[in-house]
Amino acid sequence: MAGADGDDSLYPIAVLIDELRNEDVQLRLNSIKKLSTIALALGVERTRTELLPFLTDTIYDEDEVLLALAEQLGNFTMLVGGPEFVHCLLPPLESLATVEETVVRDKAVESLRKISQEHSPVDLEVHFEPLVKRLASGDWFTSRTSACGLFSVCYPRVSSTVKAEIRQHFRTLCSDDTPMVRRAAASKLGEFAKVLELEYVKTDIIPLFTALASDEQDSVRLLAVEACVSIATLLPQEDLETLVMPTLRQAAEDKSWRVRYMVADKFSELQKAVGPEITKNDLVPAFQNLLKDCEAEVRAAAANKVKEFCENLPEDNREQIIMSHILPCVKELVSDTNQHVKSALASVIMGLSTILGKDNTIEHLLPLFLTQLKDECPEVRLNIISNLDCVNEVIGIRQLSQSLLPAIVELAEDAKWRVRLAIIEYMPLLAGQLGVEFFDEKLNTLCMAWLIDHVYAIREAATSNLTKLVEKFGAEWAQNTIVPKVLGMANDPNYLHRMTTLFCINALSEACGQEITTKQMLPVVLKMSNDQVANVRFNVAKSLQKIGPVLDSNALQTEVKPVLEKLSSDSDMDVKYFAQEAISVLALA
């Protein structure tokens, strides 16, 4: 140990050096994660003079070690002596920003962006800006891609000559020979535009945006679409038509579906950025085309935006635009061949009813909802059911029940058990939306029928569904409508149905409270302790254990205890076991 030589202060760095040279990656990773502790032990002076040079020299390791290092260094400002010494962190981070692994480079850039805020304007120009220049003119594309993420953080705080240099470097990278660099530049174009003065947005950014948007690589073009949103928000309205729209029109009809997908994905943001007039003249036809696109991914992305797009249309002619331009496309999508498209549409189409009002909804939208409710894809049906409430608000419960309810009942009795299961899961939601009277009238029998379904998963889901319904509608409703039907099943010839009674009692006892449990449920459970089937008897023991805490001590001692004692000497070992467990849990011994 270094301590034996009488020099304790060398100990942390010696251990770190040993650990970083160890063959075990995990050990090296752990030592990097402890860097801040080591830096604290060394003090700021030695961290700057020994630790950082050592780290800068030893950057050749497994990617996960480098990733941890890049992350640690972003939080090192105070450990090197605060903002005035923060530039000491630049050399190791500069090396990390040029490695081959993208994740490491990105983390190094993130840390550099973080510590750039802690540089004074003078330090930015003396230390940080030269680093950005070195990266921007590096031989390897890795350093040039990293430089793209650093321009916007130093630009606002440097002098105008340095600003001009930064703009020049950015221009150069936008036309770099390597697609990866152009891609990185395109992805930062919007962010860089936000920190530029308006005149330079027009003279520098717009030509770059136009060039990147017609790049030969579709991966570059689609990133230019993202930048379009930021650029459009910066420009005054009168410049949009000439400077941005030609490029955007071109992107919406791009030969690569990925670019068109990006336009569809960003459509609501573009719409807000360009304002109502351009939306009406340009974006409506573009949106129609995207909804009819030959690629399913593009149609799905556009379908996802239907509600948002319609909401953001100018109010004075919103209804007319939707009815004559958007709705015909939506009608086609309802019977699209691709289930993702239909599913995306189903998740938003209900929202149109609030925009179009009652009459239009009944006439034009209800038939579409019905078609989607009967779709063979379960996701489409569920997206419709889960959004029923907004249609309910517009057209009222009667109209809804006449049109959509038969379709829901049909699904509830579907031959595929997974379809039935999905509908059960939506029952509490439907019940909440439709109210108690309507529920009792139309859906209660369904919920009861599920309790005797031949698939166990359905019976189990139906039991927990009842609990949720009781929580929604209250104990009195349960006592009048649910409990009698559940208890009636106790005499069913099928032992599986008799067991379902016990499962329901377990689930409902807490929600129904002491009185109902003691007076109505307990006698049934006790009577079932004489059942011929052992499975039923041991479930009686389990049920008594479950409902015991709800009962008062008198009922426990006089009614429950004798039955459990009888069961604990049953001929079946499982019945014995569960009876004894119940006695000990309820402390009846």
Image (tube, helix red, strand yellow):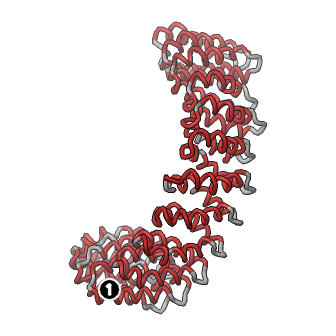
Q: Secondary structure at mark 1?
A: helix
425 or 23, nearer to the observer: 425
Query: Can residue 336 be seen at all in this image of the molecule?
Result: yes
Position of residue 76 in the picture relative to residue 521 (left or right): left
Quadrant assignment, res 406: top right
Quadrant assignment, res 477: top right
Q: Position of residue 426 (x, y in %)?
A: 61, 36
138 or 250, nearer to the observer: 250
Q: Position of residue 246 (x, y in %)?
A: 54, 76
Q: How many marks?
A: 1
Q: Amino acid at mark 1?
A: Lys
Q: Position of residue 203 (x, y in %)?
A: 41, 84
Quadrant assignment, res 425: top right
The residue depicted at 69 percent of the width and 26 percent of the height is 446
The residue pinned by badge 1 equals: 163
Give the vertical position of 177 relative to 330 (above or below). Answer: below
The residue depicted at 31 percent of the width and 74 percent of the height is 115
Q: Position of residue 49 (x, y in %)?
A: 26, 83
Position of residue 363 in the picture relative to residue 2 (left or right): right
Position of residue 97 in the picture relative to residue 504 (left or right): left
448 or 295, nearer to the observer: 295
The residue lying furthest to the top in this view is 558
The residue depicted at 59 percent of the width and 33 percent of the height is 430
The residue lying furthest to the right in this view is 415
